[in-house]
Image: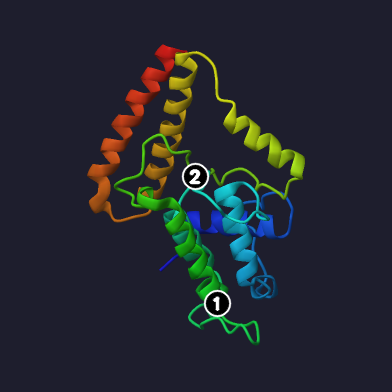
Amino acid sequence: SPVPKRYNTILRDFMAYHHQTTMYQEGHKFSEAELLEITPDHIIRYFTMKLYGDGDVIPRGKPLKGSHHTLDYYKKAISSFIPNKQQPWDNAIKKGNPTRAKVVNKFIHRIRELEGDEGSSKKRKSGETPIQALTSPSSLPTSSTAKKARVDDQSNVGGNSNTIISSILQKMQLQNSLTIDFIGTLSTSLNGYRSTLQENNQSITAELQRLN
């Protein structure tokens, strides 16, 4: 069966981060040699960047963006392009499918533990920071100054109540939009759920317009 278009978007995002360049254009084809050079460490670094904003940090708390469900989806997407993807990863000779490496699975399991009760999709809070959109270039490694700025920004939340409510609703709106996009790749049996999300998103949009 054909590979979903969103899988290709994720691969281009991953490779852009791996090569430390801007987002590859739609339709870009990666050579077999480029795909064979991918290792579990490259994947874990990308996963860390997507959840914490920096691929060099050691996860010690709940993700800033996304969840272990996000990583499961990224893993499946990247795996679909790996040559000999059915071959388990052999760490001794550095060959096989790197997404199937034990260290990758352990990393995802560790993220699930860090999420605690919120790791379950049924228990996640609606105000959670949404998954980073993949239509823009990947974030490249940042300096320690930039890391500190991110922490300071998150710890100094202020403003009047309308600003805070607007910010929360914007996050919910983007999360719903990404969920709608994801559901579009699944079975048509989920159309009812998709319609509900779309109606919910319309209500949120209307509320944002009222507040602004």
Residue at horizontal 41%, vertical 33%? 172
- What element does badge 1 sit on? loop
Q: Earlier in the sequence, mark 1 or mark 2?
A: 1
Left of 185 or right of it: where is 28?
right
- Horizontal and vertical percent for residue 104? 53, 69
Classify the position of the N terminus by image quarter. bottom left
**Of the numbered discs in the image, which one, if any, rests on residue 131?**
2
Residue at horizontal 55%, vertical 69%? 81
In the image, 92 versus 4, the foreground residue is 92
Q: Is residue 165 above or below residue 38?
A: above
> Are circles 1 and 2 on residues that touch, CB within 8 Å?
no
- Give the colour scheme shown: rainbow
**Of the numbered discs in the image, which one, if any, rests on residue 177?**
none
Q: Amino acid at mark 1?
A: Asn
- Horizontal and vertical percent for residue 77? 49, 62
Residue at horizontal 47%, vertical 40%? 130
Left of 142 or right of it: where is 186?
left
Q: Amino acid at mark 2?
A: Ile
Q: Is residue 35 above or below residue 51?
A: below
In the image, 131 versus 52, the foreground residue is 52
Quadrant of the rendered image containing residue 199: top left
Q: Which residue is mark 1?
A: 97
Residue at horizontal 72%, vertical 50%? 141
Q: Residues within 10 Å of mark 1 (few under 14, many from 20)?
A: many
Q: How many badges with numbers are in the image?
A: 2
Residue 184 in view of the camera: no
Single out the residue that lies furthest toward the bottom.
Answer: 93
Q: Is residue 212 above or below residue 92?
A: above
Quadrant of the rendered image containing residue 12: bottom right
Residue 56 in view of the camera: yes
Left of 60 or right of it: where is 38?
right
